[in-house]
Image (cartoon, helix red, strand yellow):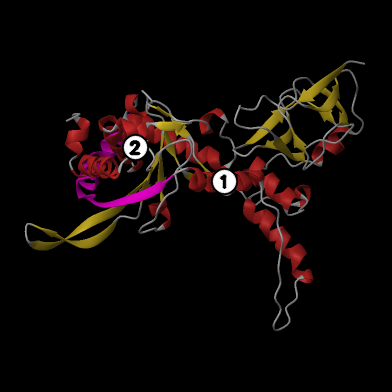
Amino acid sequence: MSIIEVKVPQLSESVSEATLIAWHKKVGDAVTEGENLVDVETDKVVLELPALRSGVLARIVKGDGEKVASLESIALIDTEAKAVENEKKAAEVPAAISPSVRKLAHELDVDAASLEGTGKSGRITKEDVLGAMEKIAAPQVSTQSGSRAEERVPMTRIRQRIAERLLESQQNAAILTTFNEVNMQPVIELRNRYKDAFEKKHGIKLGFSSFFVKAAVYALQKFPIVNASVDGTDIVYHGYFDIGVAIGSERGLVVPIIRDADRLSFADIERQIADFSARAKTGKLTLEELTGGTFSISNGGVFGSMLSTPIINPPQSAILGIHATKERPVVENGQIVIRPMNYLAVSYDHRIIDGREAVQFLVAIKEALEFPGRMLLDL
């Protein structure tokens, strides 16, 4: 007999523990090297834990829902044993299902193996799981007049962490918000003029996100204090520009980091954001991609927001809020004209950033977007 341990992967310094969402193998099941054994949820991502060697799952030390620490042993694999009824047991775990959907099925107590996937190539989707849950729950919910049904659902670890960080931000920073409006017509015209050629050359669509990231970097270079952070009684000035981009997913808000954004082209930034968005939906973002950052951007405009006061992502000192671009009447040269306007908001830590600097920083972003040539020529 040759036994090896299955251990929790090395977690980052900011993550003290994780939760086992769902085992995909039972004791006695055959496992193949590289096959996902269990989904591990931290406060940032859902990780897949693959088998290091082929064999049989001899013992599960930590079960579904249990909390585990970095490098903790959670199971044993016998690399010399043979599985009984291997094919039958393997069929019990549906392969065509993403970790996020599998997690949802586990939380709702839906047997994913019994579902018939309606997605591409028979893939089980979120809608399949929710539909099965509704069928199960329907007989249990009262339909009598005046019924006041309630449901208590534990927060996921990520949702708990989001709540903790938002509260931490408000308690530990002196947050103020300043606003300004920006005429998006120059950016819209520039994008419309070159979007086809851009996509043909770079293989990625030219969106507006890269303009906002570039404008933020342009302004941060002019006002380094906005790119700084507080450490005790010290101010830490960062000589690099790691921009966090907030992305909403089914599992909650995540903020992956675009490293060294000042060195990237528009195409590089668009590719990274598209990649982050796709992997956020399936929980494939890594801990490293969600750790760090010197400044963040939150785009509530994709959901139709007109105005908001974004909350700083600690230990950062500022965050840019972007909102929906709408045609609005504005005055230009004494005349009322219609322009595609966007209201921008910058929330900042008043402990180290004065109002004057915050206002000027936001004006610099406004200028970079209204006169994109200045941003492109570094003027």
Crowd around label 2: few <14 · some 14–19 · many ≥20 (10 Å): many
**Who is closer to the viewer here, 196 or 43?**
43
Mark 2 vs mark 1, CA separation in Å = 23 Å
In the image, which residues are magenta?
Answer: 174-201
Where's residue 275, x and y in %?
Answer: 47, 35
Name which residue type carries label 1.
Ile
**Who is closer to the viewer here, 197 or 173?**
173
The picture quadrant where one finds residue 378 is: top left
Is 325 rendered above or below residue 80?
below
Q: Which residue is mark 1?
A: 162
Secondary structure category for the residue under label 2: helix
Where's residue 362, x and y in %?
Answer: 27, 44
**Who is closer to the viewer here, 301 or 115?**
301
Q: Name which residue lies at 31% across and 41% down.
A: 354
Residue 286 part of the magenta segment:
no
Crowd around label 1: few <14 · some 14–19 · many ≥20 (10 Å): some
Is 65 rendered above or below residue 60?
below
Furthest-bottom residue in this view: 145
Residue 39 placement, left or right of 196? right
Q: Which residue is mark 2?
A: 213
Q: Quadrant of the C terminus?
A: top left
Secondary structure category for the residue under label 1: helix
Of circles 2 and 1, which is in front?
1
Where's residue 48, x and y in %?
Answer: 68, 32
